[in-house]
Image (cartoon, grey):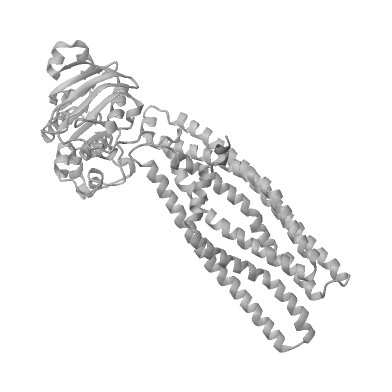
Amino acid sequence: MATDTQRPRPGTAILRTALRRNIGAMIAGTVLMGLYQAAETAFPIALGLIVEHTMQDRSLGSLGVSIGSLAVIITTVSLSWRFGMRVLQKANTTEAHRWRVQVAACGLQPVARDVDGLKSGEILTIATEDADQTADIIEVVPLLVSSLVAVVVAAVALSLADIRLGLLVIVGTVGILSILAVMSKRIGSSTQEQQAKVARAGAKVADLIIGLRPLHGFGGNHAAFGSYRRVSTDAKRQAITVARVNGAYAGTALALNAVLAAAVSLTAGWLAFGGQISIGELVMAVGLAQFIMEPLKMFSEMPKYVMIARASAERMALVLSAPPVTVPGPERPAPGGDLEVDGVRHGTLRGVKFTVAAGEFVAIAPYQPRAAADLVAVLAVNAAPPAYEGVVRLGGQELADLSVEAVREHMLVNPYDAEIFGGTLRTNIDPSGSSRTLSEAVEASMLTDVVALHRDGLDYAVRDRGANLSGGQRQRLSLARALAADTDVLVLHNPTTAVDAVTEQLIARNIAKLRRGRTTVVITSSPALLDAADRVLVLDEGVITAEDTHRNLLADDEEYCLAVAR
């Protein structure tokens, strides 16, 4: 138990990492900002000295030296602030960029991480807002130290005038920070809860945007909007709670700082009235009481920002510290392209077993859509080997022994809802620009009419998610991308559900022709694709129940006829 309590939390480790790799910038920023605060504090001290000496001597030389001193102080204040904030903000921005990239890299890794149910929208919020707020610690620490410098300089200067004034500043500062430290804990917990609710609202928006067309299709957009409104309302209420807590914190800090400044001024006035300090020292004390308000305000706000940064770091740790769902092996599949599924149990699959020889074109006819989705998840390694029973072998090697990168280089699984990206037709079909079969893929997928329809051809601009394309055009574009990859093993899931029957016939023949000699698996109920395959496997109730050519199955299996008839 003692070991667990002493172990630093992941969020704390993230903050330490951020501080450690920006130590140089933070030292430079602390020196410059400390110089700024010292010069700010020196201003009322200089005014007091001017009153104390220059006005007594009534010398133009003393007045000139005083004016020159004030000019040096003002110049120091201006330049130290300018360059100090430049150093700190550059480090802050750079550090935020590093964390954004790191969180995004975790979200885009071939092997998914166990992020405890976080959705992509929540990860997006963590990669943006939380990364920025975590990096704020780079500015918080130097500003905290520089504010402390101002308080110390003021306390020392006042102590030289009268020890009671210096002690008043020190004791008052400690008391203010003690009160605000307690309040800052509430801010940290409230902010963490707000960030989680905002992230959930963002995830809901992302889900709704992805499913916008289907929602409009069956009239579910109003119900979906109501669902989002409830989530957003929760986030709004929590944001109001955080605003109230922040307001109470800021108001309390301002009030306490004002009370301390007033106490210093009144005490100095009382001492001057009693002749215990001079008029120059009174001017200095009153001036310091006013100037010390700014560093005290900054000093008292720092605990709040530390708690916010810590809350954001804890949320980032949910992603960065999450273990991978599986640890992939180091092997690579042997060339050839054979695929074996041996006794796989996952979701609705109940011991699926089949083999596809290298170079074979096999169609799988699923009677239940869910079984098809479960099989695709296994083949695409979206369901990692530990998540299911049985074995999948690619090129004679078990998937568990292969690196995920090697699997996806060797076998491409193209889902029926493959994403279309903003860009052009060309960049969607061949994102890397290295395909040697781009034109053949365009022809085989029957995308030629889309290319010919636009003056820019393959360079025609495609909007995000293919918003300016029809459903059939988006599906054919996705198919063209899969074919252009030219992998040893290609798995297609319902690649022609949005195209007409004539086009479907042509696409089926083209796929068989283009993929001749390479392993191809099509999971579909399309008669055209089933007929083009070398053989058909029937997937019913989670197992393979029949195997033959499409035409033989039509002749001998009435249930098959009903399942694939259109």
Q: Is residue 320 left or right of residue 251?
A: left
Say which of 527 and 535 sits in front: 535
Q: Is residue 261 visible?
A: no
Q: Quadrant of residue 218?
A: top left
Across and down, in percent, residue 212 comes to: 38, 34
Can you name the residue that lies furthest to the front here? 2
Across and down, in percent, residue 505 comes to: 15, 28
Q: Quadrant of residue 436?
A: top left
Say which of 43 and 500 sits in front: 43
Rendered position, 149 above or below 56: above
Rendered position, 556 above or below 44: above
Across and down, in percent, residue 478 comes to: 25, 37
Number of callouts: 0
Rendered position, 318 above or below 179: above
Q: Is residue 553 left or right of residue 314?
A: left
Say which of 200 and 186 sits in front: 186
Q: Residue at x 68, y 49 (%)?
A: 180
Q: Quadrant of residue 358?
A: top left
Q: Is residue 293 visible?
A: yes
Say which of 194 and 220 sits in front: 194
Can you name the residue that lies furthest to the bottom here? 60
Can you name the residue that lies furthest to the right here? 274
Q: Is residue 522 left or right of residue 233?
A: left
Quarter of the image that includes the N terminus: top right
Quarter of the image that includes the C terminus: top left
Q: Is residue 211 left or right of residue 542?
A: right
